[in-house]
Image: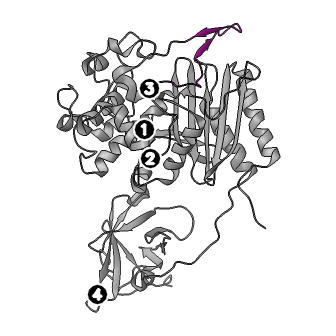
Amino acid sequence: MTYSPEQLLPGTQRALLHRIATAQSEGRAPSLVAAVRRQGRTVWSGARSCVDGHAPDGDTQFRIGSLTKTFTAVLVLRLRDEGLLGLEDPLEKHLPGTGVGEVTIHQLLGHSAGLGAEAPAPWWERTPGTLRPELADVLGEQTRMHSPGQRHHYSNPGYTLLGALVEKVRGVSWAEALRREILEPLSMHRTGSHPQAPHAGGWAVHPWADVMLPEPAEDLGLMAPAGQLWSTTDDLLRFAAFLAEGDDRVLRVASVKQMRVPSAPSEPGEWQSNYGLGLQVVRSGRRTLIGHTGSLPGFLAALWISVEDDVAVVTLTNTTAGLMVGGVAADLVDIVAESEPRIPEPWRPLPEADAELLALTGPWYWGTRSNVLRMAPDGGLELGPLQGAGRGARFTAQPDGTWIGLDGYYAGETLRVVRNSDGSVNHLDLGSFVFTREPYDPAAAVPGGVDEGGWRGLEG
């Protein structure tokens, strides 16, 4: 039986429409638009509006607030991949004179630099950026709320610094770098720092009465890299595809995956939510979602991707508060993933196999604990417990013949194949742990040696 991904089933479509209709009605939002992408294409879109015949579509711009931060993070990682900076570099090395130059670029990307959450008064989201013409005006006098690297503390000024870093290293404005390096390659022609018709107007809805108040749409100036962008569901689904799959024209796949790795301890009790490098990483039920939410006065936005389910959702609305847009977007992911589970790709054998690598696969023992080493489809190795839960990791080959852990307990650790004088494998060394073909193999270099009496039963 064949399956066409071009259209979702009628029941799924109705469930999606019901969810956004309920959200718009109960959240009292002037308008709301959402769209779903899977298997490389948009498979559903829907909208609701308080004005008949004026529902937004995939080409209608909304402000996306802090979703902008993900774009800024991509620009910074491009600089890293080009060798122009290192993530562990102190900011002072590339952007001197900020007064917080000891914090690292990695800490700024993951909101662990200890900087304040907001710029000094007046409220930066509802006032023109001309009130904060210098970085010192954005940072204020109390620049450090926590010691760098100790905890996650969300910081909008931190992303202002990253935008200034991009400008300093590139020699062009943040907006120009964004257009040239992300928006144009991904054909995101309806995304930019300022609105272009058709676009939604921002509204505040009275908390106790069904009346509205227009919100200002200020140019945020230096704060732009933290929240300036306007975009559409069509454009953001293109960006979602990039975040899920990578695109070498913008950022290599390994760097995109690095963005998803939690970069600092989360807040106490917030185990379901963490932050990578410009990406939120959240647990929604049994799913891991990557993406970002955003808000500015008059607008709320959310982009969530379940990479495992191959489902991406964008939800945009033009209200200041009252609608949990991140939860709505997560619900849309669940509806599609549960109603129409991803159809796995057919299993196919590898085009070729490295004989030496193949010989390493199979059971290995750390002491008496059984593990299994497998060849990964991408040419790497995967180590994990033979049964149940336990330590494991994926490994990638290095030029010197060793392997480096990519994730899990052994992330960053080195796996070495230790051979006998005749070339046969004696054991695997993983961060000083010895893995042998038999439990406590006497022929291998087991730390502490193996009792000469060997294995035995209970003596009478």
Assess whether residue 209 is covered by the magenta stretch. Answer: yes
Q: Earlier in the sequence, mark 2 or mark 3?
A: 2
Which residue is denoted by mark 2 in the rendering? 185
- Relative image position of residue 416 (x, y in whole percent): 31, 73
- Relative image position of residue 54 (x, y in whole percent): 71, 23
Q: CA distance from mark 4 to mark 2?
A: 51 Å
Q: CA distance from mark 3 to mark 4?
A: 61 Å
Residue count near mark 1 (Cα–Cα under 10 Å), binned few <14, some 14–19, many ≥20: many
Q: CA distance from mark 1 to mark 4?
A: 51 Å
Q: Earlier in the sequence, mark 3 or mark 1?
A: 1
Q: Quadrant of the N terminus?
A: bottom right
Which residue is denoted by mark 3 in the rendering? 228
Q: Which mark is residue 71?
A: 1
Which residue is denoted by mark 4 in the rendering? 420
Which mark is nearer the camera, 2 or 3? Answer: 2
Q: CA distance from mark 1 to mark 2?
A: 13 Å
Residue at coordinates 65% horizontally, 43% vertically from top-left?
A: 36
Which mark is nearer the camera, 3 or 4? Answer: 3
Q: Earlier in the sequence, mark 4 or mark 2?
A: 2
Residue count near mark 3 (Cα–Cα under 10 Å), binned few <14, some 14–19, many ≥20: many
Question: What segment carries the magenta color?
Answer: 195-214
Q: Are marks 3 and 4 in contact (CB under 8 Å)?
A: no
Under tag 2, what secondary structure? loop
Q: Nearer the viewer, residue 36 or 26?
A: 36
Q: Nearer the viewer, residue 97 or 424?
A: 97
Under tag 4, what secondary structure? loop
Under tag 1, what secondary structure? helix
